[in-house]
Image (spheres, rainbow, N blue to C red):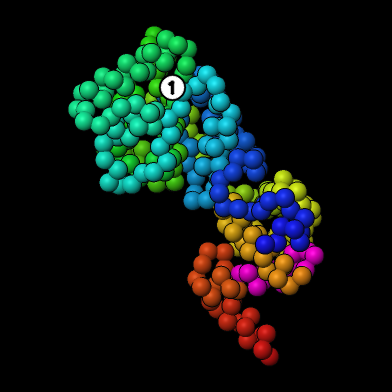
Amino acid sequence: MYESFYGFKERPFALLPDPSFLYLSKGHRTALTLLRYSIANRAGFTVVSGEVGSGKTTLVNRLLDEMTTGVTVGLITFTTNSFGDMAEWIMMAYGLPYKGKSKVELYDEFVQFLISEYAAGRPVVLIVDEAQNLGVQGLEEVRMLSNVNAQKSYLLHTILVGQPELRDLLKKPELRQLTQRVSVAYHLRSLTREETEAYVRHRLQVAGGDPDLFLPEAIERVFESSGGVPRLINTLCDLALVYGFSEGKPRIDTAVMDAVQEDRGMMGLPGGLADDVVTLSARQGTS
């Protein structure tokens, strides 16, 4: 809608976790470096946690883009409390047959798969997104399936990605055998004020637009409303571009951001102004 008006080749703030738009803040750069390190060294378990919308899945997608050859990757992105037998899901993640097989057969065939990949010089990596939903039982099943090693190397490297609840889950005594095998752990934090500005400018530029499209005061509002959470930043900035386009504004200023925040506040949505602030603003507008 607004792409041609602002000179974009694509939407700069789409909510899909597109690795081509990844902004490497200090935290995201560290997390990506640790993920690369853990894969290169065939670590047992790696844990990356962060708040909802902090950019975890985008990091995973960037990692997947980098692992084009020489690594066998299984990815599980859909998890719930009633997820079911982990062995079947893991076999499915690698395109291995799993229907009509007992747990013993699944375990044996998966071990044989790990051994054959190891012999071929292909590290096997399992990535589980939203891992906090697996609960104690699901995580313990993952540990059991990875309980195979050759000489000094684990045959399966597992990356668990999840919300802060994952950290709390891993503190449970029932999972102490798993946590003892965690070699790399990192928690992604929200962006700072300076990083938020750099993030907005980065995405505008990647999309082919003017990095100065948002005035500094408008970015300040974005940071205050989003708390530095990338997904919320995307939501607010995308809406601001729609509002700015509808009013024919060449720059996104505080008036545009105020309108976005007020409308979201009226609906009780994240990133909106509180009800009392919205009411006061509306009264001032009619006085």
**Residue 176 falls left or right of residue 238:** left
Q: In this figure, what is the number of numbered marks?
A: 1
Q: Residues within 10 Å of mark 1 (few under 14, many from 20)?
A: many
Position of the N terminus, as image quadrant, is bottom right
Mark 1 lies on residue: 124
Q: Which SS does the magenta portion mostly show? A: helix
- Measuring from the top left, give residue 85's x and y in whole percent: 26, 36
- Measuring from the top left, give residue 53's x and y in whole percent: 52, 51
Magenta residues, start to end? 249-261
- Measuring from the top left, give residue 26's x and y in whole percent: 64, 39
Image height of 78 relative to 118, above or below: below
Image height of 77 relative to 102, above or below: below
Q: Is residue 259 magenta?
A: yes
> Residue at the spot x=46%, y=19% of the render?
123
Local SS, label 1:
strand
Residue nearer the viewer, 256 or 77: 77
Specify the farthest residue to the bottom. Answer: 287
- Measuring from the top left, give residue 21's x and y in whole percent: 65, 44
> Residue at the spot x=80%, y=65% of the render?
250
Q: Is residue 110 visible?
A: yes
